[in-house]
Amino acid sequence: MSSSTPDLPEKAPDESSKLKTFLSILRKFVGVSDIASVRFSLPAQLLEPTPNLEYWNYLDRPETFASIGTSDEPLGRMLEVLRFWFTKDLKYIKGKPCKPYNSTLGEFFRCSWEVGSTLPELPVPSQGVVNGASTVKDDNGKPARVCFLTEQTSHHPPVSAFYIDCPETGVSARGFDQISAKFTGTSIRVTPGQHNLGIFINISKRDNEEYQLTHPAAHLGGLLRGALSISVADTCYIVCPKKGIKVILQYLEEGWISRAQNKVEGLIFRYDPDKDTITRTKDVPEGDVLAKISGSWHGQMYYTLAGTNEPRLLIDITPLFPISKTLPPEETQLSNESRKFWSGVTEAILNKRYSQATKLKVEIEDRQRQKAAERQENNEEWKPRFFTGAVTPLGKPSLSEEGLKALEGIRAQQYQLEESKIKGA
């Protein structure tokens, strides 16, 4: 079906044929060290009608983020961070992995979630169980709001900066999203890129405690059998230097003949930030252990306090699904805001006009290349609008004056911003 007959819908490809086509394209990249940096273009029928910046967030359950900092005990707060950790990528557990649109330089996305209540406090030695959830409201008695702002700050390599904020609870987070991917012939191995040093969480109401959460490597499999799935078999770390508490989480590799259990084991323990060299749970001195972590990241996760044999429920993933986000009204979105920027492609895909969608997608990609060539010819340096730099050595982006203004607008649900004058998108 050619793009000259856009009024007739084209036949939608089934999942199996989509994966076969995707696999045939991927085979061209066997041996390429990082296919994510190549940013190869896929035909529209292989894409999900979702912008990458909208898809890639860690707030599938925003109440777990808003609840961080509730506990008066350092161990309790680390457990709250872990509860957020195990819900941040719920979309991969409850839904199928997908390939969204590649982000363009200067493209941005903003949204929010209303959180009427946080989760119950977690019992640690110096406090009892709190039944029910405490309500989180602002000074006007309205529910708390978790706000999210992200911008594509670099194209080569592809990097986006993000900032999350819940002013009512004093919790914020920031970081850079960048992945490195390698096709092994049967699966895709995805690891954090050099600028992706994890998620940095700050609790202002707890003397600005900061937590760094690093990402494990993951495998996207199921390409050969036509059913995509994500597996994790790696180690990741969470540290709070101010309180001298560290977590090691070990995602266990599945046996090739056994059913996937998605098991995780780990330890929470005291550590010295200035002398720390421990990377394995078996090297942690028994006297430093505060709690053990165990369970399935697809089901129930438990913690067992040191000196006890009673596992306590940390989080049950089973009944949870991603929560819908609140976006600015369409009339207030800017031309380089993700939903509006990709609206033509999205509409064509939803109407199964794949030739038209591919045509529009190629036009966008050509326009980006042209603008990049013009900047290079004029010796112009592109700068982000909402963040102060494309990347930072510490992996912690800072909001610019425009970024602070945009974040305040999300909080107040006042989305008016002037059209960007930056020649990025």
Image (tube, helix red, strand yellow):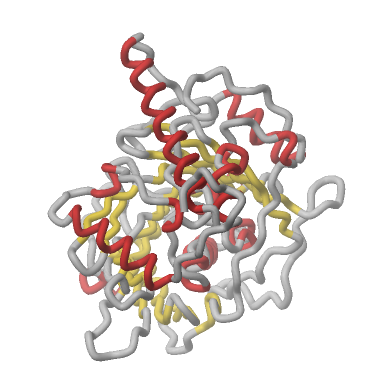
Residue 322 quadrant: bottom right
Residue at (59, 72) in percent of width and height: 122
* Residue 386 location, quadrant: top right
Quick one: which residue is furthest to the left in this view?
31
User: Relative to 322, is 328 on the left or the right?
Assistant: right
Identify the residue at image location x=63%, y=56%.
Answer: 66
Q: Is residue 144 left or right of residue 222?
A: right
User: Residue 180: where, in percent of width, then height?
Assistant: 28, 50
Q: Is residue 210 visible?
A: no
User: On the picture, is 305 further left or further right than 132?
Assistant: left
Determine the residue positioned at 53% across, 40% down: 150
Residue 408 position within the rendered picture, expressed as x and y whole percent measured from the top left = 69, 34
Please name the residue shown 52% across and 48% down the image.
51
Answer whether residue 127 is visible to the viewer in this image: yes
Q: Nearer the viewer, residue 233 or 85?
A: 233
> Does 233 sit above or below residue 415?
below
User: Residue 31 at x, y = what percent?
Assistant: 13, 54
Query: Residue lying farthest top?
Result: 378
Residue 174 versus residue 121 in the image, above or below:
above
Counting from the top left corner in percent of width and height, residue 14 is at 45, 70
Describe residue 269's horizontal placement relative to residue 344 as left or right: left
Mark count: 0
Foreground pick, 209 / 87 = 87
Seen from the viewer's position, the closer of residues 332 and 148 is: 332
